Amino acid sequence: MNFAIIGCGVIAETHANALKRLAEEDCVLYACCDIVPEKADACAARHNVPKVYYTDEAVLADPDVDVVCVCVPSGSHGDVTIAAARAGKHIVCEKPLEITPERAIQAAGAARRYGVKMQSIHQRRMMPAAIAAREAIRKGQLGRVCLAEAQLKYYRDQAYYDSAGWRGTWELDGGGALMNQGVHGVDLILWILGGQVDTLYGRAETLARKIPVEDTAAAVLRMKDGALCVIEGATTAYPGFSTAFSIYGERGTISFDDSGVKEWNFIDPETAPPRPEDGTAMGGAGSNIDITIDGHVALLRDLAQAVREDREPILPPEDALAAIKVICGIYESSRTGRPVRI
């Protein structure tokens, strides 16, 4: 199965390295594409890629391309995914699927309309602790969930934002600490809770960086089942801290971070679910270049299997909508000073 990477920036390396690990499973990095020829050439040279393209139209016209990895700036995800779907290519789309709910819905709809498989990259869902926490809630082993927390405290200096013209902009990044880095954690806590958000109140501020979007944010969400969820997101937390999640229920507490489980305590140990094994740390707290590839390997493998088996991928595009709606809701609440109903 031939994969093509469109957009040869930093995250393209993660996709390329994940495909190297999947080479024995017949997943081949066949082409690199970037509108900056030097980037495409360099990516192809580093990874011994046979085909190089400098326009989206050219790579999508190649009949030997089966899957495209969309690694362009966030605000361009929709345009590329829709074009890829129209060309009959299966899609792996980096987070966020798009930067507004409306554009994300259009991107997801294109995959359905043209009958292609599309996987969204939210690799934290592959963490054993996250999977076990979600199952414990679904089975009622925590009882009623009262409070949940997502602490998304990254560090990105001014040089990071200055390194590419699209970073930290509303037009192409869609926001700052929440829409770029924090979207992973927002997606994960919503997925674990398994419920829908009723209302939220949030503040998103620019406190330390010279950017038009937020570098620091906090929000309180009220879920439709009454649970409260607190989200903290920042790129101002030096030197960057492990992303952490906690869920407090009537019958126990679950807490974990990038390194694994911190609390797995239940009032009745006899009915408690087994404590999960620690997975590989996701990385990325202090730098965008230290993200580990295990989650990407799992999701790219699943997309290939979904194509071969003609089934839904584990993370279809519609699943990516909830986090985008919530983050845009936090931005709206911060602008208006009022709660927002989701």
Image (cartoon, grey):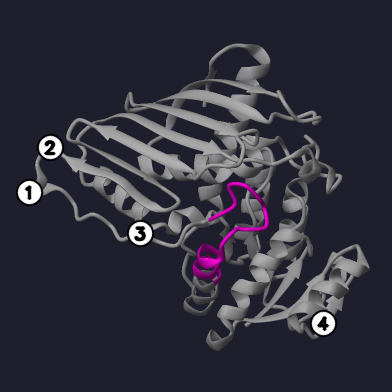
Q: What is the distance, in whole Å, between disc 3 and disc 4 at their CAs?
A: 39 Å
User: What residue sits right under mark 2 in the picture?
Assistant: 267
Q: Are marks 1 and 4 in contact (CB under 8 Å)?
A: no
Q: Residue 195, can we see it?
A: yes
Please state which of the two labelled residues, at mark 1 or mark 4, is closer to the viewer: 1
Determine crowd level at label 2: few under 14, some 14-19, many 20+ residues with C-alpha closer than 10 A.
Answer: few
Q: What is the distance, in whole Å, between disc 1 and disc 2 at their CAs?
A: 9 Å
Give the magenta part as a residue range.
283-300
Q: What is the distance, in whole Å, between disc 2 and disc 3 at their CAs?
A: 22 Å
User: What residue sits right under mark 4 in the picture?
Assistant: 51
User: Considering the numbered disc 1 on the image, is that residue within a helix, a strand or a loop?
Assistant: helix
User: Considering the numbered disc 4 on the image, is that residue within a helix, a strand or a loop?
Assistant: strand
Q: What is the distance, in whole Å, between disc 1 and disc 4 at their CAs?
A: 57 Å
Q: Residue furthest front?
A: 239
User: What residue sits right under mark 3 in the picture?
Assistant: 278
User: What residue sits right under mark 1 in the picture?
Assistant: 270
Q: Is residue 120 shown above or below 172? A: below
Q: Is residue 57 left or right of residue 4?
A: right
Residue 88, horizontal then vertical, whole percent: 70, 70
Amino acid on which the number 4 mark rests in the picture: Lys
Determine crowd level at label 1: few under 14, some 14-19, many 20+ residues with C-alpha closer than 10 A.
Answer: few
- Marks 1 and 3, the one that precedes in the sequence: 1
What residue lies at 79% left-to-right and 36% top-to-bottom? 169
Amino acid on which the number 3 mark rests in the picture: Asp
Q: What is the distance, in whole Å, between disc 1 and disc 3 at their CAs?
A: 22 Å
What residue lies at 85% left-to-right and 70% top-to-bottom? 40
- Marks 1 and 4, the one that precedes in the sequence: 4
User: Considering the numbered disc 3 on the image, is that residue within a helix, a strand or a loop?
Assistant: loop
- Marks 3 and 4, the one that precedes in the sequence: 4
- Marks 4 and 2, the one that precedes in the sequence: 4
Q: Residue 194, can we see it?
A: no
